[in-house]
Image (tube, helix red, strand yellow):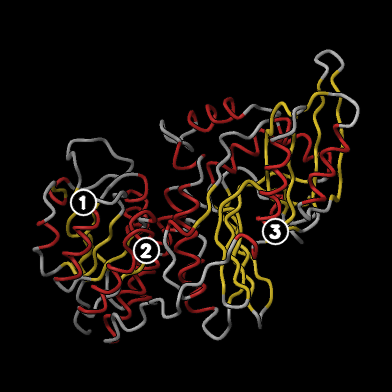
C-alpha cells in the first residue's frame, strides 16, 4: 500500500451560520472531497469571538481560538476561509493571510464590493488565489460562470433577483396582501431579515452584489457610487395590487447593462410581466439572467442564502484553490478589470416607467398631466384614474412607453408644479421583455 496522502490544512474565520455549514460539509463529504482533490481537507483552527458559545455543529474545543494568529502563524494551514462578514477585521485578516502565501476563500460581498481590487492585487502579487463565489447568490455558481462560462463571449446584460430578504417581503405583500411593515416583521421573525434591515430593504446589499457582477461581467472597475439604488421601504401594498391588475409582479431587481461601450448599473423595484420567469421567483430564492452576444439568454436559479447553500459555494472554492495549488497555477486566473469605465448619461438611460399620483379630482387635471408628459417627450402607454368621492381626490396610474431618464425627470418636475397635485407616491421601472 502507498503512503497516506498529506492532509491540506484549512483555517476558518467565523463559525456562525455559514461557518457551521462549512464544517458540516467538510465532515459529511470528507471522502468525496478527498477523492476529488487527492488529499483530505482538515480544519486545523477556527477563530471565533466566544469559544463557549453554543453552535449549530459540534467542534472540538481544541480547534477553537480567539486569536487570528492561530491561523495566520500556522504554516500547515494552506487555505483560509473568511465568513465573519463586515469590512474589519476581515480585510486585515485576508490581506495578512495572502501576504503569508495562504489562499483565501471568502463569502464577504461587502468587502469584495468595496476593496475587491486591492485584495486581488495583493493575491496576484503573492501568487495566491482569492475566491469569492459565495459573495453573490448563495449556492448559485454565478461568479465562476461569469469568469469561466462566458470567457469566450461578451456579456451585454446581467439582471435579476439577488436579495432573498426583499424577495420574501415582496412575496408576502403580493400573495397575502401584507403591508411592508407586516411583511418585514415576518421576515425578521423567521431570521430572513436583521433587526436593522436597512442594508436589505434600502437596496444596499443588492447594490454591492451588482458591483461584483458588473465588474466581472464588463471587466470595468465598477464602484458602489456607480450603482443607482432604490429600495422597497416606501413601496405600498396598493402599488403591488395595481401592478397585479396590470399583469405585473413587483420585484427588486439588480440590473447592469452595456450598450456601445457605456454601462448603467442600478437596483430598483421593478414591474415584471407575469409571463417572465422572474415573476415566479418567490420567497428567499434568487435568480440571475445573463445575456451574452453569442450564447444569448441564460438563467441561474436557486437559494440565495442559508447555511448549506452558501457553504456549498465556499467549499467548492476551497476545492478549486487546492487544485490550483497542487497544479502550481495559483493566482494565475484572478479576474482584474482591464476596460476603462464609461457610464451612461441620464439622457442615454432609457426604460419604461410606472408612477402613481394623487391629485385633486377636478376638470382638466388629467389633460394637464398628459400635456406635461408630452412637452417633456414622454409617451403614455397606459393611464388609469381611480376617483375617491369621499376625499374629492383621485389616484392616477401611468405606464410610459420607453423614455429617457432625463425626459422622465423633466416631466415629473413639471407635474410637481401643478396646483392640483397632492402627492407623487411611487416611481418604478417596468422590465422590458
The residue under label 2 is 315
In the image, is residue 195 above or below residue 70?
A: above
* Mark seen at residue 89: 1
Q: Secondary structure at mark 2?
A: helix
Q: Could you give the CA–CA distance between mark 3 and mark 1, rounded to whole angstroms? A: 43 Å
* Quadrant of the snapshot with the C terminus: bottom right
* Quadrant of the snapshot with the N terminus: bottom left
Disc nearest the viewer among 3 and 1 = 3
Q: What crowding class fits label 1: few (fewer than 14 Cα within 10 Å), some (14-19), or many (20 or more)?
A: few
* Mark seen at residue 404: 3
In the image, is residue 343 above or below residue 245?
A: below
Q: Nearer the viewer, residue 243 or 18?
A: 243
Q: Which is more N-terminal, label 1 or label 3?
A: 1
Query: Furthest residue to the right?
Result: 363
Rendered location of residue 421, percent (x, y) = 74, 29
- When asked about the image quadrant of residue 186, the answer is top right
Q: Could you give the CA–CA distance between mark 3 and mark 2, rounded to whole angstroms? A: 44 Å
Disc nearest the viewer among 3 and 2 = 3
What's the residue at 57%, 77% (across, down)?
261
Q: What crowding class fits label 2: few (fewer than 14 Cα within 10 Å), some (14-19), or many (20 or more)?
A: many
What's the residue at 56%, 56% (across, down)?
266
Rendered location of residue 80, percent (x, y) = 24, 63
Q: Which is more N-terminal, label 2 or label 1?
A: 1
Rendered location of residue 280, percent (x, y) = 71, 50
Q: What crowding class fits label 3: few (fewer than 14 Cα within 10 Å), some (14-19), or many (20 or more)?
A: many
Rendered location of residue 304, percent (x, y) = 52, 52
Q: Which is more N-terminal, label 2 or label 3?
A: 2
Disc nearest the viewer among 1 and 2 = 1
- When asked about the image quadrant of residue 56, the answer is top left
Q: Nearer the viewer, residue 174 or 361?
A: 361
Q: Could you give the CA–CA distance between mark 1 and mark 2, rounded to whole angstroms? A: 22 Å
Amino acid at each position: 500500500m502507498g503512503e497516506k496522502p498529506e492532509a491540506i490544512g484549512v483555517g476558518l474565520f467565523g463559525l456562525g451560520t455559514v461557518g457551521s455549514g462549512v464544517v458540516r460539509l467538510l465532515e459529511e463529504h470528507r471522502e468525496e472531497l478527498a477523492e476529488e482533490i487527492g488529499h483530505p481537507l482538515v480544519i486545523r483552527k477556527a477563530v471565533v469571538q466566544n469559544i463557549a458559545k453554543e453552535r449549530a455543529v459540534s467542534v472540538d474545543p481544541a480547534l477553537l481560538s480567539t486569536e487570528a494568529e492561530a491561523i495566520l502563524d500556522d504554516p500547515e494551514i494552506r487555505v483560509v476561509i473568511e465568513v465573519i462578514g463586515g469590512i474589519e477585521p476581515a480585510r486585515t485578516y485576508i490581506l495578512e493571510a495572502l501576504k503569508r502565501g495562504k489562499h483565501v476563500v471568502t463569502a464577504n460581498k461587502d468587502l469584495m464590493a468595496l476593496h475587491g481590487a486591492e485584495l486581488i492585487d495583493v493575491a496576484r502579487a503573492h501568487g495566491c488565489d482569492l475566491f469569492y463565489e459565495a459573495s453573490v447568490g448563495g449556492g448559485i455558481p454565478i461568479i465562476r460562470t461569469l469568469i469561466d462560462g462566458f470567457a469566450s463571449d461578451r456579456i451585454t446584460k446581467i439582471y435579476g433577483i439577488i436579495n432573498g430578504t426583499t424577495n420574501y417581503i415582496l412575496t408576502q405583500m403580493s400573495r397575502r396582501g401584507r403591508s411592508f411593515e407586516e411583511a418585514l416583521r415576518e421576515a425578521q421573525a423567521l431570521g430572513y431579515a436583521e433587526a436593522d434591515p436597512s442594508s436589505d430593504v434600502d437596496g444596499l446589499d443588492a447594490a454591492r452584489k451588482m458591483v461584483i457582477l458588473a465588474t466581472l461581467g464588463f471587466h470595468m472597475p465598477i464602484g458602489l457610487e456607480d450603482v443607482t439604488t432604490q429600495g422597497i421601504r416606501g413601496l405600498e401594498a396598493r402599488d403591488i395590487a395595481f401592478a397585479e391588475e396590470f399583469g405585473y409582479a413587483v420585484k427588486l431587481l439588480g440590473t447592469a447593462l452595456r450598450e456601445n461601450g457605456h454601462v448603467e448599473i442600478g437596483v430598483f423595484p421593478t414591474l415584471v410581466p407575469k409571463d417572465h420567469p422572474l415573476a415566479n421567483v418567490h420567497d428567499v430564492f434568487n435568480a440571475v439572467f445573463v445575456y451574452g452576444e453569442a450564447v444569448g439568454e441564460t438563467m441561474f436559479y436557486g437559494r440565495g442564502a442559508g447555511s448549506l447553500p452558501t457553504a456549498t459555494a465556499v467549499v467548492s472554492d476551497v476545492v478549486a484553490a487546492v487544485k490550483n495549488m497542487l497544479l502550481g497555477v495559483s493566482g494565475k486566473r484572478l479576474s482584474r478589470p482591464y476596460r476603462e469605465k464609461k457610464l451612461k448619461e441620464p439622457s442615454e438611460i432609457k426604460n419604461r416607467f410606472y408612477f402613481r399620483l394623487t391629485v385633486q379630482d377636478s376638470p382638466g387635471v388629467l389633460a394637464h398631466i398628459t400635456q406635461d408628459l408630452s412637452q417633456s417627450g414622454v409617451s403614455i402607454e397606459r393611464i388609469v384614474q381611480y376617483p375617491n368621492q369621499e376625499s374629492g381626490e383621485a389616484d392616477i396610474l401611468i405606464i410610459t412607453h420607453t423614455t429617457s431618464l432625463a425626459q422622465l425627470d423633466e416631466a415629473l418636475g413639471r407635474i410637481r408644479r401643478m396646483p392640483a397635485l397632492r402627492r407623487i407616491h411611487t416611481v418604478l421601472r417596468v422590465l422590458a421583455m
